[in-house]
Image (cartoon, rainbow, N blue to C red):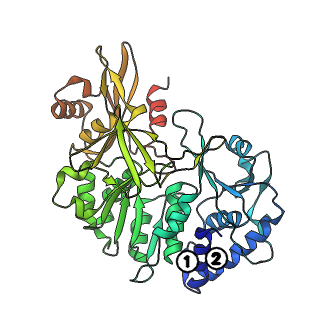
Amino acid sequence: MSFFLTKVLAALDDGGDRVLFVQNGGTTFHQARDRLRRLHAGLCETETEVVAVDLRNRPETVLVQLAALLRGATVLMVPASAPDRDRLAAASGATVVTDRPHDWPAGDVRTLDDLDGEPEPLRPPETVSLLFPTGGTTGTPKLIRHGGIYDGMAYIFTPSPDGPGRTLLVAPMTHMTGNATVLGALLRRDTVVVHDGFDAGAVLEAIQAHRIDTLSLTPPRLAALLDHPARKSTDLSSVRSLSLGAAPLPPHRLAQALDVFGPVVGQGYGLTEAPMIASISAAELLDRPGRLGSVGRIVPGMEARITDGEVEVRGLSMMDGYLGGPDIGAGWLRTGDLGRFDDEGYLYLLDRADDVVVVGEHGTKVHSTVVEHALATHPAVRSAAVFGVPGPDGRLLHAVVVAGTAVTAEEIQAHAREAFGQEHYVPAAVDFVDALPLTDVGKVDKRALVQLVTAP
């Protein structure tokens, strides 16, 4: 039987009347178990081999996922921002379980009410299989097959000797990060405070009200938290683990997070294809300012190398492969990230390969992330995004800035000129916005910014 599902069912049994989920009231472990049994029964008429889960952040999202896995189905987790839901369902032949049926005009679509059956015993199958779409930033999203990594979670996430904790979830459960967060908390017997979407003020309020000890954030969301006017008056002393990931973090923001939250801040690096690649703890960062720009050392069970500037990885934390493709086996995976290692084995990410901007008559390659981090050190700048746009003689560097105090485009350009000493790294134009657009996962949406500044 699946080790992962066996451990999940044991956690639901052991949790008893303690609260598992907090959202519009509380759901105990046994209430979640009983709801899982009803959803499992409701899926009995689903003959498809794939069940697509398209639900907002709510307890039922992970319970439908588990019910389908217990039925032996492959589960497709559908991102909230998926632009072509029909294509995803068609590619996988899925039956869709959703609270947004109007977004699925065709196909076998079920709502939660359709799955409210009579509780029945739960018997784990031998294995689990899940599909996660890639982001599709460079074309049509691929469907990634995952399986063994979930058994790995069952080994990694175990109850703490200090007793149950309290985890805050803001990432979508249908994304790998949010999915691992909620399942990890369940395996640890923690309570999960579920937020449907991100609001910095609501996060600060939840940390204080629920004594949150574990949460994870993307760099833009961390910045919003650090800059929020209520942050200084919020009691953050309960936080024991704040993990950061999904994109490189400006070093000065990481230093600020360590100052605000204390030595509990760590950073990780992973992809949907390989969720755990590198990590760095607060202990490795304290009194070592040079490491603030690193995503850490490669985790046990994984390997990484740099080939033509690009990070390649292989090891235990890997997808099985792409839907319709062979298992990846022991082969190397190209991450699409450019990086370098220092002499101690710490990895530094320079940019996404697709975000490098080739500027100037000599075709100088400019790493947009490096410029963003430099602009963010200006005292008036809260955050910045840099990308390439068409110019009369090739690509031009363009910056969009969120400023906390008055500053001009010329001052931003002068700051870049002073930081780099080369005109190639100076944005040709600077726009100012109140906030950078983010994806549902919490990354800066550069495609939306490009469309904004290039629209006629």
Q: CA distance from mark 2 to mark 1?
A: 8 Å
* Badge 1: residue crowd in 10 Å (few <14, some 14–19, many ≥20): many
Asked if the residue at tag 1 contacts the one at tag 2, i.e. Cβ–Cβ closer than 8 Å, the answer is yes
For residue 53, above or below residue 13: above
Residue at image coords 56%, 72%: 23
Report the side of 449 relative to 111 (left or right): left
State which quarter of the image contains the N terminus: bottom right
Residue 315, percent across and down?
Answer: 45, 51
Label 2, residues with CA under 10 Å away: few <14, some 14-19, many ≥20: many
Residue under the image location 35 percent in, 42 percent down = 305
Q: Which residue is mark 1?
A: 20
Residue 231 against residue 346 in the figure, above or below: below
Q: Upstream in the sequence, badge 2 or badge 1?
A: 1
Is residue 234 shown to the viewer in this render? yes
Task: Identify which residue is drawn at 55% across, 62% down.
Answer: 150
Q: Toward the viewer: 109 or 312?
A: 312
Image position, residue 348 (x, y; %): 29, 45
Please state the horizontal and vertical placement of residue 382, each as a whole percent of the image. Answer: 30, 47
At numbered mark 2, what does the secondary structure look like: helix, strand or loop? Answer: helix
Q: What is the x, y in percent for residue 108? A: 80, 51
- Give the SS element for disc 1: strand
Residue labelled with disc 2: 32
Which disc, if any, is residue 288? none
The amino acid at mark 1 is Leu
Would you identify the image quadrant in which residue 437 lies?
A: top left
226 or 33: nearer the eye?
33
